[in-house]
Every structure is written in structure tokens, then in C-alpha cells.
Amino acid sequence: MGAKGTFKIQIFLSCILLFGTMATKSLEIGYYRCTNTCPQAEEIVKGIVYKYVLQNPGLGAGLIRMFFHDCFVRGCDASILLDKSSHNPNPEKLAVPNNHSLRGFEVIDEAKSAVEHVCPGVVSCADIIAFAARDATYFLGKISYEIPSGRLDGRISIADEVKALPSPFHNLTVVKALFAAQGLSADDVVILSGAHSIGRSHCSSFRRRLYPVIDPTMDQKFGYFLRTKCPENAPVDGVVLQDFVTPSKLDTRYYRNVAELKGLFFSDWSLLTSSETVNLVHDFRTTPQHFETKFAESMVKMGNILMLPGTKGEIRKSCRAVNY
Ligand code: HEM
Ligand SMILES: *[C@@H]1O[C@H](CO)[C@@H](O)[C@H](O)[C@H]1NC(C)=O
Ligand SMILES: *[C@@H]1O[C@H](CO)[C@@H](O)[C@H](O)[C@H]1NC(C)=O
């Protein structure tokens, strides 16, 4: 009996905990397992994320960024996924920070249809984004954590509200204030910015640091290199890797890049402008082991950003449209 019995009791207890706190509507680890509404949900999402990230690690970066852009606007409610429609004529996904740069929508679509096939109508798109970002973090960074679930999908998506997101041209004061508005600290700014160790950026996100002069806050040789990738009057918006050394590894290389003035964005450089943030940059640069747990914790924290009070949620049938 021993070991097996203990294991059963543990599952039992974690689910008691779930029902104990349901009244406060907080999220719970293993929500779909504990409620027995879709025990396989997380495994199904993981399989699909794995398939795509294996083909193209950039999609993993896209999914982690999607989670951030979803959670900062109306909470983690999958508002980022809604297509333009009569309900939402100007959705978030068409706003400048997202249009043409956010990616991974096809991964979410496929995960949603796979989950719907097995347990129709119970798993929210908002949770699928959270699971997918968690799985991408594991595949690209070998950082593993459990992410509470039980979110609902929102019905509203408004392009103008993406102003809640920090811009690459913001200074630290503004970035910190935008994070604070979401209940996130200066440490969270530093920790989560570590995601700029993977994926890509369009030239338009940093071109003004290259012309007419290379920003003195940027390593000048790096600036000349970026000029070759992003010519001044290029007809198309090119892309460059965020981290030229280990582009598909979610590691602490970002902090070294920032410290060496080789971060792409002004907002990256700005982490060096206050003792509140620069110390952590140097800590992660010199002691990479400190990063993994912190990153996991901050992702969970970001995932706890709730929908606006009084907002009505639902489980969408299609992640791209509200239910009728
Ligand atoms: C601190 C404020 C932040 C600013 C100003 C910022 C800004 C940006 C910008 C401008 C890009 C390039 C987009 C493009 O041109 O294609 C980018 C990419 C990215 N960001 Fe951030 N970001 C911030 C924080 C975060 C956070 C909190 C996360 C997630 C934890 C994140 C994850 C990513 C990822 C993974 C990419 C690469 C996306 C891809 O390859 O598709 N960023 N970010
Ligand atoms: C988003 O991209 C589409 C397709 O290129 C374009 O037609 C539209 O004007 C863009 N939306 C905004 C708000 O920039
Ligand atoms: C940061 O940017 C804001 C808005 O542009 C500006 O008001 C503020 O003075 C800036 N702060 C610093 C320390 O540069």
C-alpha cells in the first residue's frame, strides 16, 4: 500500500485545496485534472507545442511573448487571440506591437482543436496560452514549472489598450510603472526581460538607435553590425536575432549582452540605469543558476494577472472569436 497510497492521498489533497479556494476564484495547479473536466489537457497542449517548436524554435519565443502580451492587456484572458469582427472591430492583435510581429497563433489553434476533440467546451484559450508558454519555456530553457489554470476567456479586445505594454523606446521609469500597474516588481522587469535571450526583433523596434548616429548607449561595433542588417532606407522591415550567440536557448546570455551594451532595445539598456535593476542583471550574468527559479516564479506571477473586475468570461469554442 505505502508509496502508492501516499501518492493517491497527495493528488486527493491537492484537489481538496482546489475546491477549498474556488470561492475566491483563484487559479489552481492542475485545474482540469482536479475538476476531472479534461485530465489530458496539459499533455495534449505540450505535444503540439513540442511538435512546432522542434520545427521552428522561434515559435516558442512567439508563444512566450504572446503570454506576456495577453496578460498585460485585460489580464490573461486570450483577448490577444480575437480576430477582427463586428464584436471587436479593432482588436489587440492588429495593434502596432502585435501586428506582423506576434507569432504562434497556429500553434494555439491546433492545440485548441486537439483539446476540443477530447473534451469539448471546457478548456479556455487563456489557459492554453499559459500552458504553451510554460512548455516553450521548458523546451527552450529547460526551466520547468507548474502553471495554475482555470482562467476564462474574455469577450473584448481593443487595440488602443495595448498601451499597457512597454515599448522598446521606454525608459526604466516608464517600464517599471507599467509592470507595477500589473502588480509586477522591478525584479520582475529584469527577470522576465531575460526572455530576450530568444527569438527575433524587427529592425523597426530599434532602428532609431542606429541612425543618424549610433546611440551612445549602444556598443558602437554592435551598432555598425546592426546597420548592415537594418539599412537606413530598406523597403522591408528586416529581422535580427535577439541573441546572436545562443538564439534558441532561453539562458542568461541576455544579461551579458545588456551589460556589454549589446541589447537591441533602449529598454534593455535602461536596466543598467538604476541600482534597483542593475544588481540583478549582474547577479544573473555571473550566477546563471539564480535565473531559472526566478524566471519560473515570475511567469507564474504574470499568469495571475486577472481579468478586469466585473468582466464576463467564457470558454470560447474557437480561440479567434467570441461565442454567440
Ligand atoms: C520589459 C519590457 C519589454 C519590452 C519593451 C519588450 C519589447 C519587445 C520588442 C520590441 C520585441 C521585438 C518584436 C519585433 O520587432 O518582432 C520583443 C520580442 C520578444 N519579447 Fe519582449 N519586451 C519586453 C518584455 C518582455 C517580456 C516580459 C517577455 C516575456 C516573458 C518578452 C518576450 C519576448 C520574446 C520571447 C521576444 C521574441 C519574439 C519572437 O521571436 O517572436 N518580452 N520584445
Ligand atoms: C495590420 O496589418 C494589416 C496587414 O498588413 C494591415 O492591412 C493593417 O493596416 C495593419 N493594422 C494596423 C492597425 O496597423
Ligand atoms: C522617462 O520617460 C518619461 C516619459 O517620456 C519622462 O517623463 C521621464 O522624465 C523619463 N525619465 C527619465 C529618468 O529619463
Image (cartoon, rainbow, N blue to C red):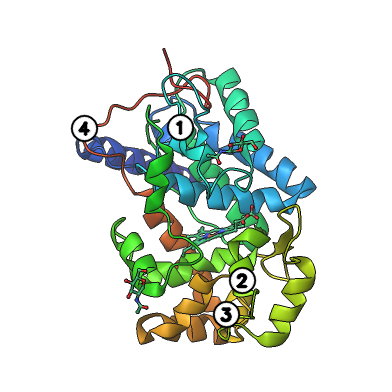
Q: Amino acid at mark 3?
A: Val
Between 38 and 295, the one nearer to me in the picture: 295
How far across and how far down the image is residue 227, in percent? 74, 73
Precedes in sequence: disc 4 or disc 2: 2
- Depth check, front residue: 152 or 12: 152
Disc 3 or disc 1, which is closer to the eye?
A: 1
Q: Examine the rendering and report whether any part of residue 248 can be seen.
A: no
**Residue at the (50%, 42%) spot, across then down:** 95
Decide if residue 314 is on the left or right side of residue 231. Answer: left
Distance, label 4 to label 2, CA atoms, is 39 Å
Ligand 3 sits in quadrant: bottom left
**Which secondary structure, mark 3?**
helix
Residue depicted at x 34% and y 72%: 173
Q: Which residue is mark 2?
A: 264
Tell me the kind of residue under disc 1. Asn
Which amino acid, mark 4?
Gly
For marks 4 and 1, give the one nearer the viewer: 1
Q: Is ligand 1 closer than 8 angstroms to the Cβ of mark 2?
A: yes
Q: Which residue is mark 1?
A: 90
The amino acid type, in three-letter code, at marker 2 is Leu
- Residue annotated with mark 3: 258
The residue tagged with tag 4: helix, strand or loop? loop
Mark 1 beta carbon near ligand 2 (under 8 Å):
yes
Q: Are the residues flagged by discs 1 and 2 in contact, CB closer than 8 Å? A: no
Going from N to C along the chain, the mark reached first, 3 or 4, is 3
Q: Residues within 10 Å of mark 1 (few under 14, many from 20)?
A: some
